Image: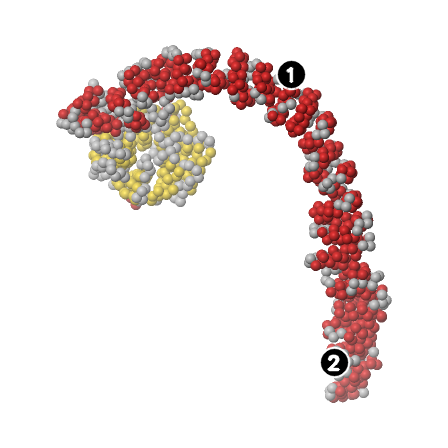
Amino acid sequence: MAKPLPIRAQEHFKLQALGIDPASINFNNLTLASDRYVCIRESRDGKKLAAIVDTTNTSSIMRRTITAGAITLHPEGKILVLRDGRQAQLFSLETKTKIKSCMMGEDIEFCKWISSRILAMVTSTTVYHWPLEGDLEPVKIFDRLANMGKCRIINYRASSDENWMVLVGIFSQDGRAAGAMQLYSKDADMSQPIDGHAAAFAEIELDGSSSPTKLFVSAVRTSSTANLQIAEIAHVVGNPSFSRKVADIVFPSGFEGDFPTAVQVSPKHGIVYMITKYGFLHLYDIETGTCIYMNRLSGETIFATAACEATGGFVAVNIIGQFFSTCVDEANLVPYITDHLKDPEVALKVATRTGLPGAEELLVKRFWKFYQAGNYIEAAKTAATSPGDILRTPQTIEQFKHANGNPAPIRQYFNMLLENGKLNRQESIELVKPAVAKGRKDLLEKWIKEDKFTLFLSFEDIPKFLTRDYVIVIELECSEELGDLIKSQDFYMAFTVYFRANVHSKAIVCLAELKLYTMIFQYAERIGYAPDYLYILNHVLHLDPDGGASFAILLVKNESGDLVTLEKIVDVYMAQNLVKQATTFLLGALNDNVPRHAHLQTRLLEMILKHDPQVAESIFSSKTLTYYDRAAIATMCEKAGLYQRALEHYAEDGDIRQVLAHSHLLKTDRVMAYFEGLSAKQSLASLQEMLDANMAQNLPIVVQIAIKYLDKLAPAKLIKLFESHKAFEGLYGYFGAIVNTSQDPEVIFKYIEAGCKTGQIKEVERICSENKHYNPEKVKNFFKDTKLTDPLPLITVCDRFDFIHDLVLYLHQNNLYKDIETYIRTVNPSRTPAVIGALLDVGCDKSIINNLLMSVRGDMLIQELVDLTEKRNHLKLLMPWLETKVSEGSKDTEVFNALAKIYINCSNDPETFLKSNEYYDPNTIGKYCEKRDPILAYIAYERGKCDMELVKLTNHNSMFKQQARYLVKRRDLDLWAHVLDSTNLRRHFLIDEVVAAVSESQDPEEVSVAVKAFMEAYLPNDLINLLEQIVLKPTAFTDCSGLQNLLVLTAIQVDKAKVMNYVKQLDNFDAQDVADYAVRNGLFEEALVVYKDNNNHASAMNVLIEHG
């Protein structure tokens, strides 16, 4: 018979048989995301597809069309990594949407998920980690070393804490596949180049260590050697050191090209699986580095592997598509090491570490060897770490009890047991006995919370009873006495002991004392036990009167029917005088609200109404009880002062109205709700009685009822009801609810009327200001007749609807000038003109009007005020107010126009005002003065440069002197052109005055413009006359060469007879120009005189010769 092997291998399926294209089964197109999924990139009918095989259900293969050049599946099979060149994308297979994508700076050569949340990506120069969560971008981890530059990357792995990473690649060297690795430490930020083909990280618990030891496992085959190396990384201070292990890898003859392709480490067994390209499997013990087993698994190349967590082994795919799994045979591993390898030390280590069978004899021998030598620590360690019950027996405990030493060997043994895991049944009870005897509950708590006890029950629900943060499990020979002992320290543990000892009555009492009432019934049903529930209830109520109700409820709510009648339970409560608790229980017991409990519902409510009416109120509110005697309860509610509930329970109208008399003691919403079910007639009758009984206290609720039930209760009847009781507050409140939505003028008027009678003047004013539907004439008259103490509502109506004259007349007649002042000061200053006009019309005293005017500070239409007073010939009345405005800095034109008119009418030095003031409108004032005083009009027009108006005024009033002076000073050629136009019938009058005005001027510009105007108007004779006055007479411009030239040249053109006189009299003209011009115009004698006087004899001789 063949010897048992230490492994089990099984083929699960062939990918070809599942329809996978054989050409796609290779390293480039197939990846093992985990032992659950195989992901293949294949081509079908010219399309690229991602095929995903669920290894637990191969009947349905998921395929998705892709365009990417490479794909990698998430270990959980929900996310597909698509990459092509520099681009990578994460795609959700569940939602069929892109999760996120990235663009790298270089082509992505290799991708692998190192955990469920991190994707590693390797480019030609760098390694990146790309977190799955959020929008995080790939993070650079380290740069590839030079030794990795020539490699094809075949693997990348990280330690469990992601502080260590290794990059693995192969390259061709001397005709063989050489391996190179880069080991990187994140904490040190350093890399180390290593020769190797495959690697993995692992953790192992060493004896005496406080935390796991991290290991790095690598395999390599060079041209001369092949070995597996196991080395510690990131040593933790205080932990024992792990010595580096190097084990030779033996390759069979004929497989010179074979090399390691994968290393998988089993955390479950501490076994290293090393797989080669050509299908060989090597098993190593991770702690010693011992090669346990070697054999060929596959005759074809294995190119993909993944760990299998369930078995502690691995799964693999070979080049022909076989998917198979391999793991250790737990029953044969230790015997194989013992029998085949003949290495008891390795066998003991594996058995102790994994708890696998096969080393029992070795362990017993070792224990007795240490024990007999007095080495109790090692003996205790051997026994405590032995698997199963090989050494952990009562005999072993007894051996340590009888052994002498300091500290006591039995204590050393128990300490070792506590350090190495849970205690078995006998160990647990032996440990507990002295702790209980000494009252050391703290020790029990410590051991239990550290989960050191292995206390266990034979059915699965009992541990759920125990609501602590630990699970108590006991497997021991229990007794009632032991339960009683432990109960003094811990009910949980005592319950377990009672249960195991079949002392069910005390077990149930423990559950009751722990308040695990539901568990009592489960326990009794499961074991077929019938407790005395009335006894238990008495016990519970004695210990916990308040909390016992939950247990009592369970007695009558049991799935199999009531275990005790409600009446008996209530009797138990009442026997202990637990009235409050009895009501609490009945509330819970009767919550199903069924007719058969009517008498109990009545009993409950009577108890509550007698002892605690407020609790009854909450019951009524929840409506959980509905079958009680309503008539009896109604009477009790009224006696208890629960008038609202009495109202709800009474059926007779007389009883109801009797309760409604106390509506001020009722909750408003309840009373409102009650009226919901009444007819309009009943409602009005009830409201009548409420007002009759106590109008002052009941009126507010009556108003609220009237408002809520507007549609049911006719407004006319409600008005009659309120008015019959002179309840104007009620009318006001009632109409207040509808006035903002009503379009009935009468409703709004009634509201205003009620508001006035209740003193709600501000609200009345608001309605008058905002409402659009009342009759303003009627409201105005009502206000006048009522003679409000505050006439603001009247003011508001009159202002809004333009009853200004009526308002002013009313206020004037009642001497309410303060209110007039309020109106024009704060309400509407713009109405001031109309108010002043009305006051003038009614003959109000001028001082009052002045005082009112002086009080106005807001904006108003000044011009309107001026026009109104001017129309009534009382403009002068405004003078103090206007002058005050000026003193306050006003620059309003209307103010100064009005002052100008007043000063003109009063002859109050108007000339000075018109000449000096710059704020009045000259045009307006000029027109105002034209018929009153043309001189003043002229001043205004002159001040404002009102050219056309001034010309018209001076023409009409023959004020040519003023017009001439204005023209000279104005220096406006367009204006000159207008007045010198031939159509101006008064031009000749003006010209005479202009000559005088120009001769008086000292301004060269004025003279120049005037001369130019005459020239442009072509008035040469008038121009000569003008120039003679300027040049020939002594003026500021007598010696002006330009004017002398102009005079002589003009005379040469139009009045030659004057030329000889001019050239003899003038001496500052341009002689050459004038003489030459005279020659051209035939005035030879005059030219000869000019030449001679200026010593131009040559020109003079020429004139004589040519024209003599």
Q: Which residue is mark 1?
A: 652
Residue 816 horizontal/vertical position (percent): 75, 45
Q: Amino acid at mark 1?
A: Glu
Q: Is residue 829 in sight in this rendering?
A: yes
Report the residue marked by disc 2.
1039
Q: Residues within 10 Å of mark 2 (few under 14, many from 20)?
A: some
Residue 213, position as x, y percentages in the image: 26, 35
Query: Is the N terminus in the top left, top right, bottom left or bottom right quadrant?
Result: top left
Helix or strand or loop: what does disc 1 sit on?
loop
Nearer-the-camera pick, 94 or 1031:
1031
Count of number-bearing discs: 2
Cα–Cα gap, marks 1 and 2: 129 Å
Instruction: Check the picture and name the quadrant holding the C terminus.
Output: bottom right
Question: What amino acid type is highlighted by mark number 2?
Answer: Asp
Tell me which residue sits at (22%, 39%) in the image.
223
Classify 517 as above or below 878.
above
* Element carrying mark 2: loop
